[in-house]
Structures are given as C-alpha cells and as structure tokens.
Amino acid sequence: MSAESVFIEQMLPDDLPAVVRIERASYPDPWSSASFSREISAQPISHPIVARRDGMVVGFVVAWFVVDEVHIGNVAVAPDARRQGIGRLLMDTLESQAVAEGCTYSTLEVRESNQSARQLYGQMGYRVIGRRDRYYRHPEEDALVMVRTLSISGAGK
C-alpha cells in the first residue's frame, strides 16, 4: 500500500485510542492519552493531525505554531504502515499548513539513534544545528536539534 489512499485530517477526541496505541508502539517513553487530549484542545497554538487509511488512524503529528516557527513535537506512524510515505505526507501537510499561517521555518528534536527519522528529515531538507544532552529518558539519550527553512511553496531551501 502507499500514501495515495491516505487522508490527512485534524486529530479528534475519538482518535485518541488509536493515537495512543501508535505512540506506545513507537516510543519507549510515550505521551499519555491526557497529553494528546490537551493538544486537541490547545488550538490555535497546537496543530495535531492524523493520517487515515480506510477510516483507521495510521499515523499522526503534533506541532505548535508560534509566531514564524512550527515546532514538531511528536510524529509516529503505525508499525505496519511504515516506509509507505505516510510520515512524509504528514510532515508535508503540516508544513503546508504552517506556511499558510506565516511560519518560515520548522524545528524538531530527534533521538540521535533514530536513523530512519533522521534519514526522512534529511531528505526533507532538515539540518542538524545543535544537541540537547540527555533530552530523552527511557533510555536516556541525546537529541539532535534540526531546522528547515520553509518557502512559500512549502519546499525547503
């Protein structure tokens, strides 16, 4: 399957069970259902979106739009839906929304050991600009801080 049959929509309270399942399958120190619920209610700053295929949530992104920056807080795709372009579709959609809201750059943190995410972000034009020592817990690990300049077309520079 590919991302062609996937639709991106705003995250809704009914999505929380699926989002939490994906989160728990993706991260050793997962966000709680309450954390996601707060993000759904924290608009206009918070922008939680989901990817749906055949009516089922297969991925999500939570980001914050602050002045001219979009900060990616959390991204995950269901294990059986990975490597099908869904993560890229989520990121592209979010960045298009950010540009429409006046954002000119995007930032995120990624586990240093998360090679698949780092590869995706690199392909999208993100570059490493710093490190946050012991940013992650369980297991403890440094985060790489990455940034990407956004253009009017949504393409990186």
Image (spheres, helix red, strand yellow):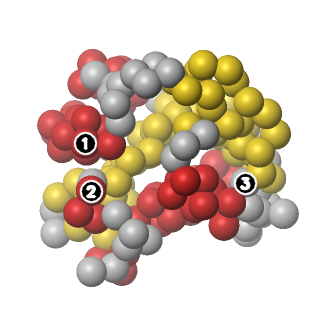
Rendered image quadrant of residue 20: top left
- In terms of depth relative to the viewer, which is nearer, 108 or 68? 108
Q: Residue at x 69, y 24 (%)?
A: 132
Looking at the picture, which amino acid does disc 2 mark?
Pro
Q: Residue 24: x, y in percent?
A: 25, 35
Q: Which of the two discs, 2 and 3, labels the residue nearer the N terminus?
A: 2
Q: Residue 150: x, y in percent?
A: 76, 56
The residue tagged with tag 1: helix, strand or loop? helix
Where does label 2 land, which residue?
Answer: 79
Q: Nearer the viewer, mark 2 or mark 3?
A: 2
The residue tagged with tag 3: helix, strand or loop? loop
Q: Is residue 78 placed above or below 136 in the rendered structure? A: below
Where does label 1 land, which residue?
Answer: 25
Q: Which of the two discs, 3 and 1, labels the residue nearer the N terminus?
A: 1
Where does label 3 land, which residue?
Answer: 126
Q: Residue at x 28, y 65 (%)?
A: 81
Q: Residue at x 58, y 61 (%)?
A: 120
Looking at the picture, which amino acid does disc 1 mark?
Ala
